[in-house]
Amino acid sequence: MSDLRDAAMSSKAWPFEEARRVLKRYQKQPPEKGYVLFQTGYGPSGLPHIGTFGEVARTTMVKRAFEVISDIPTKLISFSDDLDGMRKVPGNVPNAASLEEHLQKPLTAVPDPFGTHESFGHHNNAKLRSFLDTFGFEYEFISAKEFYESGQFDEILKRAVEKYDEIMAVMLKSLREERASTYSIFLPIHPETGRVLYVPMKNVDAENYTITFDDEEGKEWTIPVTGGNVKFQWKPDFGARWAALGVDFEMFGKDHSTNAPIYDQICRILGWRAPEHFTFELFLDENGQKISKTSGNGVSIDEWLTYASSESLAYFMYLKPKTAKRMHFDVIPKAVDEYHQQLRAYETQDTKARLNNPVFHIHGHNVPTSDMVVPFSMLLNMASVSSAEDKETLWGFIRRYASEASPENNPTLDDAVGFAVRYYHDFVKPAKTYRAPTDQEREALSDLATALSSEEAALAAIAAKNAKMGRDDPLPEADFSDPEFLQAIVFAIGKLKEFEPLRDWFTAIYEVLLGASQGPRFGGFIALYGVEETIALIESALAGEFTK
């Protein structure tokens, strides 16, 4: 364990770097509350999206890294601001028009447009929790509605009344004059309409812990700040939550970075040391636009899990969190294959390398073994050329390529086969665009078919390539079941036909034979699809059957 901890203390993996910053908070003495608290926030104004999951996944990675370098207990809280008023009706929900009359009501007072839960806020909270539970996160869920109404926030609310002028001074510096004239850190919930009100305060009473204000109709009200009658504005809410719970670490998107000093100041005013922060770049859709819960652009959690495993999603979340990433369906196959590459690498790595491997931060000490004997990208191409309608079609190819593989022995591969069929029909098939070969490509493809037809022709092509390159390499053993031998044949034809750069030859193969702009290592494709089947595929393409 000491060797592991020593390696972790010098690891450059970003979760360990963050964990070490958290540990510095308690160099002198452990936390009085008995644990280090990690928190993530969720605004349930729309359905949970991948960015929401990413915050929990990445925070869990830091928490797990902390547990390697320290024996201090940890806790992760997922806090939902479900008392927030609904500012606009989301565009991606059913019965949207029915929600118009509930604008500015707390999300937990807005009817559920899906008709499955007590409110819209409850529905979205349940969606988030369901996914986090499915993935196996260890967390405690806190609802703002329950937190305010149960009195758990009362002490901080009272302290905010006592420190009202000091907190307001912090806030007013960040506001334009027009906004500052009507601003208050408190948002009263109207005693009659239940709406969250954005109104200035006429009086803040530090003796009775009440606020006085006029509602939108001009009627004056005086209500206590405790018991769920009032909620914080969103910027003060950050600092207040940190102070109320004793938060030690929270990450958030780049769009919060300019406000982080405000959150910190308010937290300190309310009596708690500001937590450690980690700012990540935002997720973008395929058009480069920020992913939004309310607009529903980009890829949702459910959509990713329709086409790939949750582990591949966690892998995508681990990669370069400080770099903006486009979040669209085309990234899924790459994430799946890279995740399994890292699983295979982990088996032979030493401790230092393992701590830098993304799969450690996804799985901790229980990293599984990959049973993906065929890459996901290859499965997609198999589905494409075979127009696969079901899993059994692909398993027919897999069994010929790896006779020991089966759905029972390779459950992850079996899941991937199902994902590949689904992904092919939804994304690959509609986008398939074949083109006719150029004269150079036609000759090369014809020569490739010839080279695949016999051992003599294959070895002759490889020998001719060696001679053309001025090399005297010994010829390989002819084995048409070996992906490397098949790749050597493909490579030889490309060199003999003088494709420059050589990748133009492989691009031609993909575009003419597969109807795609990119594809797998073609030797592996031939081994999986079959030599005779590949020859037939080439002949069909040369006959113009794909471009009719």
Image (tube, rainbow, N blue to C red):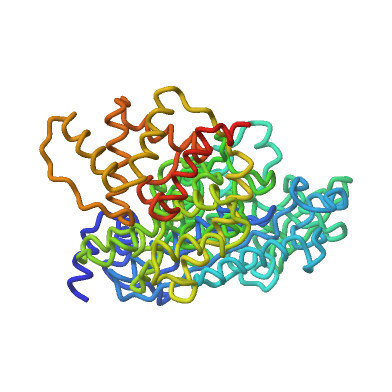
Toward the top, the furthest residue is: 439
Say if residue 402 shows up in the picture: yes
Is residue 425 positioned above or below 451 on the image?
below
- Seen in the image, is 36 located left or right of residue 131? left
At horizontal 45% and vertical 53% (from top left) the residue drawn is: 529
Please provide percent x and percent y for residue 500: 31, 25
Which residue: 46% across, 72% down?
406
Residue 206 rendering spot, x and y as whole percentages: 65, 60
Residue located 85% across and 45% down the image: 216
Given residues 322 and 201, the one toward you in this image is: 322
Query: Would residue 458 appear left or right of 133 to someone viewing this image?
Result: left
Q: Is residue 122 above or below residue 170?
A: below
x, y (%) of residue 73?
38, 76
In the foreground, 511 or 296: 511
User: Residue 453: x percent and y percent?
Assistant: 36, 45
The quadrant of the rendering that contains the N terminus is bottom left
Q: Residue at x 53, y 58 (%)?
A: 308
Image quarter in which the C terminus is found:
top right
Query: Which quadrant of the figure has residue 200?
Result: top right
